[in-house]
């Protein structure tokens, strides 16, 4: 249970940071920097307990790579989604007068953006946090957090920059995304993570779990 609660806590603070910086009126470089930093510190805090996925797509990639038992996949995802939903409720309480406008997405462009940067995120996670050559390194949290920061700067204006189905759910509950379009994030994010896992296993055969 400890690892599941850790996943809830990490996802909660990730989504809370998104809400407080975006719904709260942040602009420019502040939200991506805060979001990437929040993910980084939560990874350092929870990595030794749960692996610090905080993202259903990352959980899929790590399960496919063989570094997370398949029996943990559904509980991880449920607790991640629960953390995101709880964070959305807290943001709405903290900013009761905010009226965010849901982003209008172009399906094709948003799908590709989410796929590419979720691939990048999962690829980085697998290489810095699960590869034998990088065992015990001190840079994994920074690398993963900065991947999200890069993605947010690069394609945040195209897809909303979720790269995470739990983040997409939280953003939709906060009014930042339309609930009818979060399938774009679910499909693009899981596909990107799955392809990243396949690429890792193909390119790093010596790292077989």
Image (cartoon, rainbow, N blue to C red):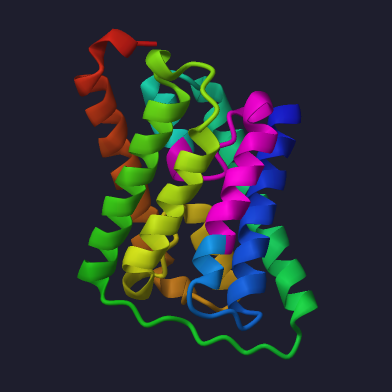
Quarter the C terminus occupies? top left
Residue 15: percent from left, percent from top: 62, 60
Percent position of residue 126, x then y: 39, 29
Q: Residue at x 23, y 30 (%)?
A: 199
In this picture, is 46 found above or below 102? above
Q: Is residue 9 left or right of residue 172?
A: right
Disc tally is 0
Image x and y of residue 139, in percent: 51, 32
Q: In this orientation, does residue 79 appear? A: no
Q: Quadrant of the N terminus?
A: top right
What range of the chain is rendered magenta? 34-58
Instruction: Identify the residue at horizontal 78%, vertical 76% (top origin).
Output: 94
Q: In the displayed structure, would residue 46 be above or below residue 9? A: above
Q: Is residue 99 visible?
A: yes
Q: Please, is residue 56 above or below residue 115 in the view?
A: above
Quadrant location of residue 193?
A: top left
Q: Quadrant of residue 86?
A: bottom right
Please name the residue shown 47% across and 42% down the image.
144
Question: Which residue extends farthest right?
Answer: 93
Q: Does the stretch in magenta take in 39? A: yes
Where residue 149 sits, quadrant-wise, is: bottom left
Q: Residue at x 62, y 72 (%)?
A: 21
Q: Is residue 36 magenta?
A: yes
Q: Is most of the magenta stretch helix, strand or loop?
A: helix
Location of residue 98 in the rendering, given as x and y in whole percent from the top left corner: 67, 88
| Vertical relation: 194 (above or below) 176 | above
Q: Is residue 96 left or right of residue 136?
A: right
In this rendering, would 96 be left or right of 40?
A: right
């Amino acid at each position: 249970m400890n690892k599941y609660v850790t996943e809830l806590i990490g996802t909660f603070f990730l989504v809370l940071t998104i809400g407080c910086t975006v719904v709260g009126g942040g602009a420019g470089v502040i939200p991506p920097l805060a979001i990437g930093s929040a993910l980084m510190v939560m990874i350092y805090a929870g990595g030794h307990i749960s692996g610090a996925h905080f993202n259903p797509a990352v959980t899929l990639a790590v399960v496919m790579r063989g570094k997370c038992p398949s029996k943990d996949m559904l509980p991880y995802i449920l607790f991640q989604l629960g953390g995101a939903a709880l964070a959305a409720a807290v943001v709405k309480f903290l900013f009761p007068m905010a009226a965010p406008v849901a982003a209008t997405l172009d399906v094709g462009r948003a799908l590709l953006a989410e796929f590419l940067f979720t691939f990048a995120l999962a690829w980085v996670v697998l290489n810095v946090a699960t590869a034998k050559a990088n065992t015990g390194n001190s840079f994994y949290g920074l690398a993963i957090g900065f991947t999200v920061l890069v993605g947010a700067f690069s394609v945040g204006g195209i897809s909303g920059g979720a790269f995470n189905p739990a983040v997409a759910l939280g953003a939709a509950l906060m009014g930042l995304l339309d609930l009818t379009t979060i399938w774009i994030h679910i499909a693009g994010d899981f596909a990107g993570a799955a392809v990243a896992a396949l690429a890792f296993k193909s390119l790093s055969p010596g790292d077989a779990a």
